[in-house]
């Protein structure tokens, strides 16, 4: 069974630039999550999708972050414009249902200069 | 507001000995707890979990203990192996009680475990 795929693995941008991350969950997984993990901290949930609908985006900084999950499969997370404090690893996870085991992708390490 | 705390940033143990990783939580609504393990450049992987209706759950070398009155849980690894060297995250969620936080994981800061041969 293929795992959660994420790309790119690494990205370096300057502040005020835009960036997008892509996630392909495990086939058939209805629930998809985006997490932000700042160095020295645990992952923090940004947004949760159930199929192509948003379940929880209470911790997503909506003035600069956006996410979509068209057709209930792949998802993209965008930051526009980026700030220095956005430097982090962005993790995507997926599950069959909300309380099932979350399978994480390898993450995208973003550095904002 | 750190609802899940892992106060030890790192732990170093000898191969074959016991590793004990600790986690404290403040939100009394949490009723389901999980441990994740993370190797460098990989995403976290699920290790073991426990529901608040139990005080112990065991899976091979891994045992999780839950003390609800103290809002404390611990992960015991016996015997520790060099391959166990990783970052361990404690996470908590609301399961039995349902509600808007259902299934939403709150993670601690992580503890770096190093097992020396």
Image (spheres, rainbow, N blue to C red):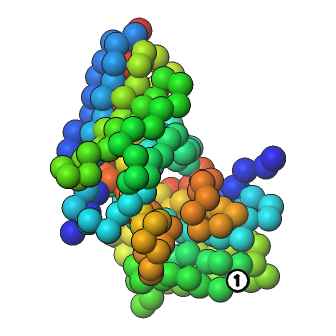
Residue at (54% x, 60% y) in the render: A91
Residue B101 location (% of width, % of height): 43, 75
Residue A25 location (% of width, % of height): 71, 62
Closest to the observer, A29 or B60? B60
Q: Is residue B29 left or right of residue A19?
A: left
Q: Is residue B56 above or below residue A6?
A: above
Residue B53 location (% of width, % of height): 40, 52
Residue at (25% x, 56% y) in the render: B25
Q: Is residue A53 left or right of residue A33?
A: right
Most distant residue in the front direction: B53
Quarter in which the C terminus of chain A is drawn: bottom left
Residue A80 location (% of width, % of height): 49, 83
Q: Residues within 10 Å of mark 1 (few under 14, many from 20)?
A: some
Q: Is residue B57 above or below residue B16?
A: below
Q: How many marks?
A: 1
Residue at (79% x, 49% y) in the render: A2
Q: Is residue A51 visible?
A: yes
Q: Quadrant of residue B31?
A: bottom left
Residue under circle 1? Answer: A52
Q: Callout 1: residue from which chain?
A: A
Closest to the observer, B115 or A89? B115
Q: Is residue A105 above or below residue B84?
A: below
Helix, strand or loop at mark 1: loop
Q: Is residue A81 visible?
A: no
Residue at (59% x, 68% y) in the render: A98
């Amino acid at each position: 069974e293929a795992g959660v795929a994420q790309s790119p693995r690494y990205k370096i941008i300057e502040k005020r630039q835009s960036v997008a991350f892509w996630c392909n969950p495990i086939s058939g997984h209805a629930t998809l999550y985006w997490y932000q993990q700042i160095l020295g901290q645990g992952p923090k949930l940004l947004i949760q999708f159930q199929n192509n609908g948003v379940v929880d985006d209470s911790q997503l900084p909506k003035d600069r972050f956006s996410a979509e999950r068209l057709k209930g499969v792949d998802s993209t997370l965008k930051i526009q414009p980026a700030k220095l404090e956005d430097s982090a690893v962005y993790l995507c996870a997926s599950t069959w249902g909300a309380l099932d085991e979350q399978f994480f992708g390898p993450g995208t390490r973003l550095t904002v200069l | 507001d750190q609802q899940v705390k892992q106060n030890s940033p790192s732990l170093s143990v000898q191969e074959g000995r016991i590793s004990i990783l600790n986690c404290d939580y403040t939100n009394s609504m949490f009723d389901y707890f999980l441990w994740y393990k993370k190797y460098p450049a990989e995403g976290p992987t699920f290790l073991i979990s426990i529901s608040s209706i139990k005080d112990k759950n065991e899976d091979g070398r891994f045992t999780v203990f839950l003390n609800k009155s103290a809002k404390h849980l611990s992960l015991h690894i016996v015997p520790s192996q060099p391959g166990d060297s990783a970052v361990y995250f404690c996470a908590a969620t609301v399961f039995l009680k349902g509600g808007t936080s259902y299934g939403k994981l709150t993670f601690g800061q992580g503890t770096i475990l190093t097992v020396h041969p």
